[in-house]
Amino acid sequence: MIANYINFKTEEEINQPIYRIIPCRIFEEMLIEQKNYLRKPKKWNDPFENFILNATGVLPDGEEATFSFRDSQYGQCWSLDKDSEAVWRVFCPDGKGVQLETTVNKLYKSLSEQTDTLSSFIGKVSYHKKDTLLKKGKTIYLTSDGIGIASTLLFKRIEFSYEKEIRLIYMRNNNKNAQNICWGDTISYPIVPNDLFNQVVLDPRMNDCEFQEWKMKFKELRMEETKIIQSDLYKPLKGFQVYAKEP
């Protein structure tokens, strides 16, 4: 297994589908710009994000230090859960969301092909109780391949385990192969949406007019029409019959 796939054990795992729910307007921007975006962990909602690198470090010689590279990390969150009603409501409370589907491998390659294997990673988040989490965060492995630092973004509290998260991670360095990366608290890199996304699933709470309107917008921005569907999470069952029998 390629080391940059952190916490994955088999080829089957890295080829499994993953999902990300975002507002439709954000996906519209992605199609217009033909780019994907990663953000610094400090911009995420959970205050425990990146808690390891935000702590005071103790070097092998006992000297205390801060980790300068903590502001050089960027991430993007995906999920193994295909259709979570809770996730729809958390990330798109207005009912105007879209779920993107790709695979672990496709997502990693979309970034690594713009950079290199020393700065691009993808990993499965592990969930722990708070006291266990703090114990696990006591040691950082400063490996030359960068995996030790990237792994610090793959710990989360057990209360968030329903998210079943997969994280795409980029660590900024003096990478000469990253000319296409745009910097700031958010980074962007070029993608071909029709190649990256297997399917685009619109919010199950949309009425038919809203669904058709957003479908047309995405189609006009060169997203393949056959890949654009609506979630059937709230669709009534059709053709289901119940047979009554006497006891």
Image (cartoon, rainbow, N blue to C red):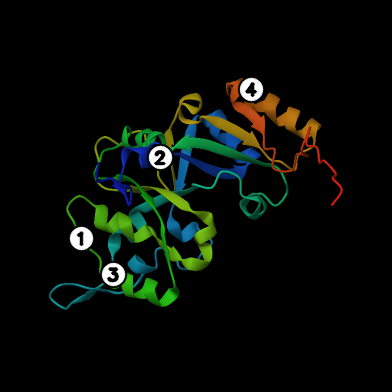
Q: Earlier in the sequence, mark 4 or mark 2?
A: 2
Q: Which of marks 2 and 1 is nearer the N terminus?
A: 2
- Residue 215 image offset from top left, x and y in percent: 68, 27
- The residue at which mark 2 appears reads as 104
- The residue at which mark 1 appears reads as 142
Residue 66 is labelled as 3
The amino acid beneath tag 1 is Leu
The amino acid beneath tag 2 is Val
Quadrant housing the N terminus: top left
Q: Residues within 10 Å of mark 1 (few under 14, many from 20)?
A: few
Of badges 2 and 1, nearer the viewer stands 2
Residue 219 is labelled as 4
Tell me the distance, in whole angstroms, between the alpha carbons under discs 1 and 3: 14 Å
Q: Can residue 103 be seen in this view?
A: yes
Tell me the distance, in whole angstroms, between the alpha carbons under discs 4 and 3: 48 Å
Q: Would residue 207 be found to the left or right of residue 7 on screen? A: right
Which residue extends farthest front? 247
Which residue does the image show at 50% across and 31% down from the upper left?
A: 197
Q: Which of marks 4 and 3 is nearer the N terminus?
A: 3
Q: Would residue 220 be found to the left or right of residue 17 on screen? A: right
Of badges 4 and 2, nearer the viewer stands 2
